[in-house]
Amino acid sequence: MTTTLLEIEGLTKGYPGVVANDDVSFSIREGEVHALLGENGAGKSTLVKMIYGLVRPDAGQMHLQGSPYRPAEPRAARAAGVAMVFQHFSLFEALSVAENVALGMETAPPQRQLAARIREVSETYGLPLDPFRTVGDLSAGERQRVEIVRCLLQEPRLLIMDEPTSVLTPQEVDILFQTLRKLAAEGVAILYISHKLDEIRALCDHATILRQGRNVGTCVPRETSARGMAEMMVGSAFAAPEGRGRAAGEVALDVSGLSLASPRAFGTPLRNIHFTVRAGEILGIGGVAGNGQDELLAALSGELASPPGAVRLAGVPVGASGPAARRRAGLLAAPEERLGHAAAPDMSLTENALLTGAQREGLLSRGFVRWGAARSFARRVIDAFDVRTPGPDTAARALSGGNLQKFVIGREVLQRPTVLVANQPTWGVDAAAAAAIRQALLDLAAQGAAVVCISQDLDELMQVSDRFCALNEGRLSDIRPASEMSVEEIGLMMGGAHGMEVAHV
């Protein structure tokens, strides 16, 4: 029998109008990979923030190796042997790997000594890194290695991982899992948060399920189906998305010879992109983060001007048109970054609904905002997409990431676009919410819209796409029928291991 490493007893944390964690208790053993599961807004993030010292609990207690544990800040958690790899990378792109690692250390050794240690640890755990490479030149998978190695240099007893595979190809996931199993074999406990339930079944020894802030049960993932775990999370059954096999209509979006420099210092330029999407069709575009997805969405949405004739909507060139003009014409977009790009954090949901829906929903009259109509539109989005929020006057930043994602996608879908471009539409969203969003995209295509789904989620691409291609270093692969492809083939294409050739379909 292994020893209990972390014991959590009755942890409770409330915020105005909501109890994020309500009397949560469970334990994690040494050498165990323990999953923390739950819907968006179930309280997972608040719980791990209390373990890592970012949030102070209102009630309850924790014990680490039998001693009281109540970290006042992350520095205290790290000193106690608790490390965390966050979902969003906290790296400076202009600095080297070693410089980034040094910034996370209380007392960093000389650069040469640190570089040798980085090489030693990264190679020991199968995550080789060049300590002198600039982070801005690394792939998403390599950047995650930096985050993990930075934690491993602390020799942690508990490693918390939040959605660690969201930017990885299947091949990179295999490497990560080998590393985590090696750490567990050495006695390190791992608290693993993910919405990818098949990964949970493959990796984790036990799972704790949260629902509405409470611990509603535990299970052994290997002995529980993915659907069974999902239904434990939501408290009921839900249907898998249905609706492929539609007949495609006329060409709605035609992209030809699209080449653009990235406006960001470490961005990826687009290189001679060609594709078409027909009415009633969903084109899936896969790719590991940082291969030009943001630039492609910006070029299609109008945030970046395109070369003459490179982007046509129903045969009409729109390359010189901005986002407002393209929206009027029926081309809508939902970007990946929820806060700051898709939604203004400090604005209410009503105000955020107004930002993109003003024209198509008739929310303006002679230059004045029709606030009643705007609030009604926001309420329709909330109701149709089951957005968990006190109401349309709630600030966007007050929502959990998954609930804000549902609002962003719903806001665009309900405007009845001719073409919808969605980048990472179910990123960070639980299984039930992901199924609902994917069904909304399928329904939108069934109503005659053309949909471009840019995603790193292979299950998503397989579920919704009629045709598939991959974006790698700003180049687009051949476009193929999704029904003819396996998950392994898609993963290889996303990683660039397929002899990328540009196709004009």
Image (cartoon, rainbow, N blue to C red):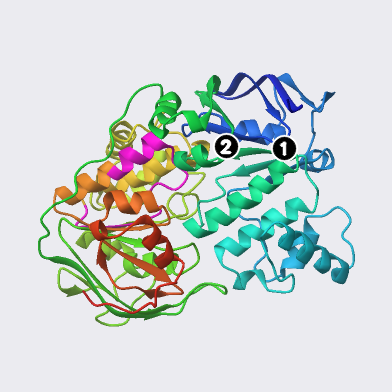
For the record, the magenta segment spans 417-438
Answer left or right for 44 relative to 282: right
Answer left or right for 383 relative to 280: right
Residue at figure coordinates x 68%, y 65% from the top left: 128
Q: Amino acid at mark 2?
A: Cys
Q: Nearer the viewer, residue 191 or 275?
A: 191
Instruction: Check residue 430 for magenta coloring.
Output: yes
Asked which secondary structure carries label 2, the reply is loop
| Label 2, residues with CA under 10 Å away: few <14, some 14-19, many ≥20 | many
Residue at figure coordinates x 54%, y 54% from the top left: 174
Q: Which residue is mark 1?
A: 52
Residue at figure coordinates x 55%, y 20% from the top left: 214
Residue 91 sits in quarter:
bottom right
Q: Is residue 363 shown to the viewer in this render?
A: no
Instruction: Check residue 365 for magenta coloring.
Output: no
Q: Which residue is mark 2?
A: 204
Q: Is residue 234 shown to the viewer in this render?
A: yes
User: Residue 138: x and y, percent?
Assistant: 60, 69
